[in-house]
Image (cartoon, rainbow, N blue to C red):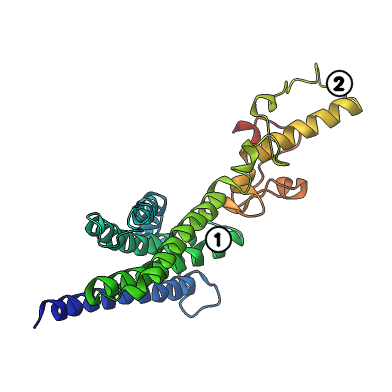
Amino acid sequence: MSGNAKNNFFGSNKLIALFIILLSIFLLQLIYNGFASENSILSINPENFWFLRFFGRLHPLAVHFPIALLLLAAILELGTIKKFNSPIRPGIQILLIAGIISSLISAIFGILLSGSAEYGDNLILHQWMGISTAFLGIFVWFLHQRVLVTDQSKYIKTYRFTLFATAFGVILAGHLGASLTHGDDYLSSTLPWSDDYENVENISFDINLKTNDNDTLSKAQEKELNLKVRAIFAHNCYKCHGEEKVKGELRLDRKDFVFKGGENGEVIKPGNTDESELFRR
């Protein structure tokens, strides 16, 4: 077997192995969704599988590895624009394969994590953006090997375009993931010209507006209190208890939801701040 043929053979085997791993992700997706669905014949409470929740919570840790590797591969590729067979080509090759494998592992952990908490519609977009990025990564590897093994330079432009598209997909999937954990306004709330801007230094107030139980608040005081409380909720609570993510079945973005409580009962007991969980926290 010639050197090129041997490289082509082993390269094909690696590609097949990666596709098998990716197909396993979709199988895991179907099975896990079946576990989580009450109407499914596979209706098993995923909370009973502690190891699924354990590995799912490794997703935030694992996801940073492929982000760094694939982005670094794209950056290094810019240094080979004039000469594809650059001395840094082997390094790019290692970054690609390590980034692809770690992105597949991260996708599996992400699917497990999605069943352990309640998220909004952004979860579906984030989930499929991550899986699509893994797909693109495999295609990038295929094109890269095609150019190296067969010396078909006509694939170079397609390879580079796909690599940069994958890097953009990594950034977008990462942003959607950050929005799930920190809220949609996590970045925009720091920009003074944004509608979501919040001056953290001003989100504080004297809660002792009443000197005794017989005092009543004026209209101006009620308005000020409402604004301050909403600001605190928006800055500290909405990212986990808002419309997009409903942790513990508790929403704090609307008054009726606040008084409804969550899976552990009421968080506000009118007239009793000592037993109101919201005040205790």
How many numbered marks, from 0 up? 2
Residue at 82% of width from left, 28% of height from top?
224
Q: Nearer the viewer, residue 102 or 45?
A: 102
Amino acid carrying label 1: it is: Leu
Q: Quadrant of residue 225?
A: top right
Residue at 18% of width from left, 80% of height from top?
9
Q: Quickly name the residue at label 2.
A: 214
Query: Taking 272 as reference, is 66 left or right?
Result: left
Q: Secondary structure at mark 1?
A: helix
In front: label 1 or label 2:
1
Q: Quadrant of residue 78?
A: bottom left
Q: Position of residue 92 (x, y in %)?
A: 28, 58
Asked whether the residues under the numbered discs 1 and 2 touch, taking CB atoms below 8 Å apart as contact, a structural biologist would say no
Amino acid carrying label 2: it is: Asn
Disc number placed over residue 43 in the picture, else none = none
Residues at marks 1 and 2, CA–CA distance in whole angstroms: 48 Å
Q: From what the image shows, is residue 239 above or below residue 113?
A: above
Label 1 neighbourhood size at 10 Å, few (<14), some (14-19), many (20+)? Answer: many
Q: Nearer the viewer, residue 226 or 60?
A: 60
The quadrant of the rendering that contains the N terminus is bottom left
Q: From what the image shows, is residue 196 above or below residue 122?
A: above
Q: Secondary structure at mark 2?
A: loop
Label 1 or label 2, whichever comes before in sequence order: 1
Residue at 38% of width from left, 59% of height from top?
106
Q: From what the image shows, is residue 262 above or below residue 190?
A: below
Query: Taking 26 as reference, is 224 left or right?
Result: right
Q: Position of residue 72 (x, y in %)?
A: 35, 51
Q: Position of residue 67 (x, y in %)?
A: 40, 53
**Residue farthest right in this picture:** 219
Query: Taking 104 as reference, is 180 left or right?
Result: right
Q: Quickly name the residue at label 1.
A: 123
